Amino acid sequence: MTKWNNSDIYRIARERMVETQIKARGIKDSRVINAMLKVPRHLFVDEALQEQAYGDYPLPIGEGQTISQPYIVALMTEALELKGTERVLEIGTGSGYQTAILAELALWVYTIERFYKLSKRAQKILLEVLGYKNISFKVGDGSLGWKEAAPFDAIIITAATPEIPKPLIDQLAEGGRIVAPVGSEYSQTLIKGIKKGGKLYTTPIEEVRFVKLVGAYGFKE
Ligand code: SAM
């Protein structure tokens, strides 16, 4: 008789998640699909929530914040068009799950989180448990960007913002892509921007709902 262990069960849950939530909704980039098949999402949530980690919804991660729904992670990542050579800036480390997906697909990930506790927990999983070697962490207001590490080939904001923060547009490389939920505190449109000739050209992707970006260029607490 076959013996199932936890890692088999979570691998099967991941395969089902990719088939029913990711591929079925039109995500095509095979690199994104492979990363979603590989990264153990259940390690990024509390033990009590691990069985729900592959469900089609966000989950709480503490500090009033959430790990995004798997499909939204895939959609935003695909829009960044990563080939493996990019330096990526992520605003809102949160659980670190999106960070892991980016670390699978890009050369280097710079990630900023405003809550020290969340950043520390993400660092523990990403560096100590999973052994990623291409991630730099910072605690602070990500709406100001990471000037010393700029320019970035891709920027992802994983929290709702009233507009794309100007420092982030300045820190985006020519030809670079930025993806962000832009709108009010209660509803936003996922926007993809491409920088050409120093200007950002944006197109809407779909309606979304994120927790808010709190900072100088975001919302007030
Ligand atoms: N990508 C994350 C994941 O996979 O778990 C989900 C991020 S959660 C939806 C948004 C995160 O942005 C929260 O952890 C929140 O604390 C953080 N955040 C909000 N405003 C921020 C800011 N100005 N700078 C950095 N992080 C911020």
Image (cartoon, rainbow, N blue to C red):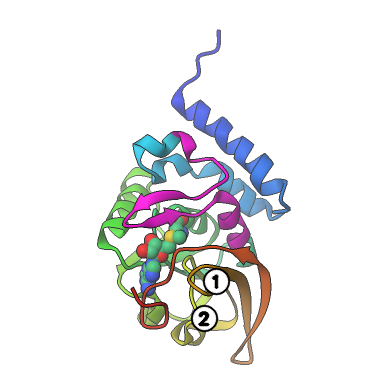
Q: Please provide percent x and percent y for residue 189.
A: 61, 70
Distance in Å between CA atoms under marks 2 and 1: 7 Å
- The quadrant where residue 220 appears: bottom left
Q: Nearer the viewer, residue 48 or 118?
A: 48
Tell me the quadrant of ligand 1. bottom left
Residue at x 59%, y 91% (from the top left corner) = 198
Label of residue 164 in the image: 2
State whether residue 49 is above or below residue 165.
above
The residue type indicated by label 1 comes to Ala
Task: Report the quarter where the C terminus lies.
Answer: bottom left
| Number of dots carrying numbers | 2
Q: Is 85 placed left or right of 116 in the picture?
A: right
Q: Nearer the viewer, residue 86 or 97?
A: 97
Query: Between disc 2 and disc 1, whose residue precedes?
Result: 2
Label 2, residues with CA under 10 Å away: few <14, some 14-19, many ≥20: many
Label 2 sits on a secondary structure element that is loop
Q: Please provide percent x and percent y for residue 2.
A: 55, 12
Residue at x 51%, y 27% (from the top left corner) = 9
Q: Please provide percent x and percent y for residue 139.
A: 29, 68
**Residue 83 appears in the picture as rendered:** no
Magenta range is: 51-77
The residue type indicated by label 2 comes to Ile
Q: Nearer the viewer, residue 213 or 77?
A: 213
- The quadrant where residue 19 appears: top right
State whether residue 217 is above or below residue 155.
below
Label of residue 180 in the image: 1
Residues marked 2 and 1 touching at CB (< 8 Å)? yes
Query: Is 67 included in the stretch rendered in magenta?
Result: yes
- The quadrant where residue 188 appears: bottom right
